[in-house]
Amino acid sequence: MINADLVRHQTDNQGVLRLTLCDASTRNSLSEAMLACLSQHIEMASNEPSVKVIILAAEGPAFCAGHHLKELTSARQDDDGGKAYFTKIMQMCSALMQSIVQCPKPVIAEVNGIATAAGCQLVASCDLALASETSQFSTPGVHIGLFCSTPMVALSRNVSHKHAMEMLLTGDMIPAQRAREMGLINQVVNAEQLQEATQAMANKIASKSSMTLAVGKKAFYAQAEMSLSDAYQYASEVMVDNMLAQDAEEGIQAFIEKRKPTWQHK
């Protein structure tokens, strides 16, 4: 069962699902329960036709402070020193991050506060991210002897290697404007305007053909891991299939006739 105390969910009439982390007492840490809850929400949204776009937001002074370190530390009392539990949590976290990338619906992070360690990983795993001017980002594991190796996977796929290594090796907090310059987030806005700006972007995306969005998102991440020639071959095949779809036929015809398209896949 989904724990409504950890993640609040609401879908509007535009098909925008807002998931709000609401465990402010732990700075919305990715506890075992939070990981399970978020994973369930993403899975459900992936299979729900009425959901077009997902916004991932949070309550409190932190968007997400990463893993629940007290929860992890308590597992050191286990007979194996915590190895099995550590493995379980890292696998759960990795599965969640991959499910966001693999979700056919665009996912937008709405960050108002700090996003550190696995919380920064969560932002980097989303397709788009908007942040308030006072938000900050870091991968601070190096400070406590625990290199942010799993956050590194998402981070290094969003920013240049030099920028990623700077964050990983120093653990320094990166202000929102710097995060935008590095490519970690898309926009920086006033905190008072953050929700409105995120909603406006979500609405714009939700107005497109859901089939087209799903095809495009899948292709984007798939080609990024290929060689140049393989990427062009793959993308060409995707484009041909896309051209044969009814929404592409309708969209092109609407453009020619200078009218708004009527999507089959709304």
Image: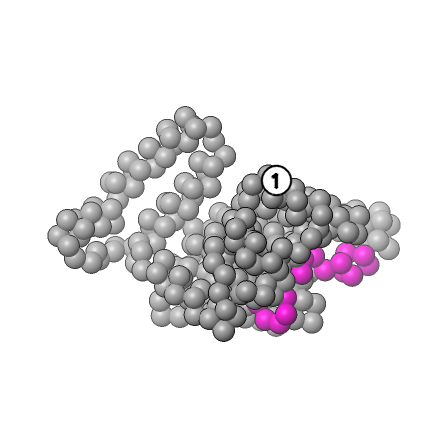
Left or right, residue 217 beside residue 265: right
The structure residue drawn at horizontal position 49% and vertical position 47%, both measured from the top left corner, is 102
Q: 36 or 191: nearer the eye? A: 191
Quadrant (top left, top right, bottom left, bottom right) of the N terminus: bottom right
Q: Residue at x 70, y 57 (%)?
A: 67
Which residue lies at the image location 34% right of the left edge and 37% below the top edge? 238
Query: Image height check: is 232 above or below 39?
Result: above
Q: Which residue is mark 1?
A: 162
In the image, residue 143 lies at what x, y percent? Answer: 77, 51
Q: Position of residue 43 (x, y in %)?
A: 51, 56
Residue 88 falls left or right of residue 256: right
State whether residue 212 appears in this view: yes
For badge 1, the amino acid type reads Lys
What range of the chain is rendered magenta?
A: 56-74
Secondary element type, mark 1: helix
Total marks shown come to: 1
| Front position in the image: 17 or 224 | 224
